[in-house]
Image (tube, helix red, strand yellow):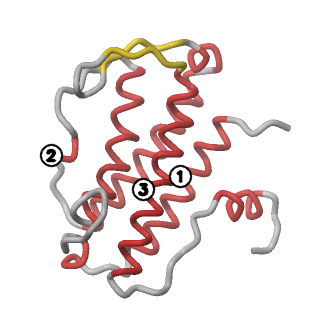
C-alpha cells in the first residue's frame, strides 16, 4: 500500500509529541540560550517548525499572513511545545477534512517575500512535514549540545514500526 499524506501527517504529530518529551528535559534558560544553528536559540528553532505548520494550512484557506507568527508568540517551553503539537494535530485534521480533491489542487500563493508560486496542496503538506523533520534534527543537535543525553527517537521508521505493532 502506498504511503499517504495522512500517514505522513500522523507521523508528524507523533514526532512532535516525542520531541516534546525531550524538550521537557530542557530548562527555560537553555531554551533561550544562544546557539550556533540556523536559528539563534532552541526556542526560535521550535517556533520555526510551528509557524510552518500554521502558515501553510492558512495559505490553503486563502488567509493572508504578512508577518512571521513567531514574532508575536509569547510563552515559554510549555506554550511552545503545546503550540507545536496542537498545530500538527490541526494540520492533520485540516487535511483529513479537506478531502483528496482539494489536496490534489494546485494553489497559487505568495510567500512572505511576496514572490508568486504555484504548488499542489498535498505536495506542500509533504514539504511541511519534511521541513519539520529537518528542524527537529537541528533541535536534537542543539539539545545534545546543551548536555542533555536522554533523547526520544523521532525517526519515521520508528513510527512505522510502532504503528505496525512491532517492538522498538
Residue 25 figure quarter: bottom left
Q: Residue at x 45, y 60 (%)?
A: 136
Location of mark 3 (residue) = 135
> Which is more N-terminal, label 1 or label 3?
1
Disc 2 packing (10 Å; few <14; some 14–19; many ≥20): few
Q: Residue at x 49, y 85 (%)?
A: 150
Q: Secondary structure at mark 2?
A: helix
> Which is more N-terminal, label 2 or label 1?
1
Q: Residue at x 63, y 13 (%)?
A: 101
Residue 71 in the image: x percent, y percent? Answer: 15, 46
Quadrant in the picture for the N terminus:
top right
Q: Secondary structure at mark 1?
A: helix
Q: Mark 2 or mark 3, which is nearer to you?
A: 3
Nearer to us in this view, 24 or 71: 71
Q: Check contact, mark 1 vs mark 2: CB within 8 A.
A: no
Question: On the picture, is 85 further left or further right than 6?
Answer: left
Q: Mark 1 or mark 2, which is nearer to you?
A: 2
Nearer to us in this view, 76 or 111: 111
Q: Which mark is residue 71?
A: 2
> Which is more N-terminal, label 3 or label 2?
2
Location of mark 1 (residue) = 13
Q: Which mark is residue 150?
A: none
Q: Mark 3 or mark 1, which is nearer to you?
A: 3
Q: CA distance from mark 3 to mark 1?
A: 14 Å
Total labels drawn: 3
Q: Residue at x 53, y 52 (%)?
A: 13
Residue 158 in the image: x percent, y percent? Answer: 69, 65
Residue 29 figure quarter: bottom left
Quadrant in the picture for the C terminus:
bottom right
In the rendered image, the vertical position of residue 149 relative to residue 49, given as above or below: below
Residue 60 in the image: x percent, y percent? Answer: 42, 21
Amino acid at each position: 500500500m502506498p504511503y499517504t499524506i495522512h500517514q505522513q501527517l500522523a507521523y508528524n504529530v507523533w514526532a512532535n509529541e516525542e520531541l516534546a518529551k525531550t524538550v521537557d528535559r530542557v530548562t527555560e534558560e537553555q531554551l533561550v540560550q544562544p546557539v550556533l544553528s540556523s536559528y539563534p536559540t532552541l526556542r526560535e528553532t521550535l517556533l520555526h517548525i510551528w509557524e510552518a505548520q500554521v502558515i501553510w494550512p492558512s495559505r490553503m484557506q486563502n488567509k493572508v499572513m504578512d508577518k512571521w507568527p513567531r514574532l508575536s508568540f509569547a510563552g515559554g517551553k510549555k506554550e511552545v511545545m503545546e503550540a507545536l503539537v496542537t498545530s500538527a494535530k490541526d494540520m492533520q485534521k485540516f487535511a483529513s477534512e479537506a478531502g483528496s480533491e482539494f489536496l490534489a489542487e494546485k494553489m497559487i500563493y505568495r510567500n512572505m517575500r511576496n514572490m508568486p508560486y504555484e504548488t499542489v496542496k498535498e505536495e506542500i503538506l509533504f514539504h511541511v512535514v519534511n521541513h519539520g523533520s529537518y528542524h527537529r534534527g537541528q533541535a536534537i543537535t542543539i539539545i545534545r549540545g546543551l548536555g542533555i543525553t536522554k533523547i526520544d527517537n523521532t525517526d519515521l521508521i520508528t513510527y512505522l514500526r510502532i504503528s505496525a505493532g512491532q517492538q522498538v
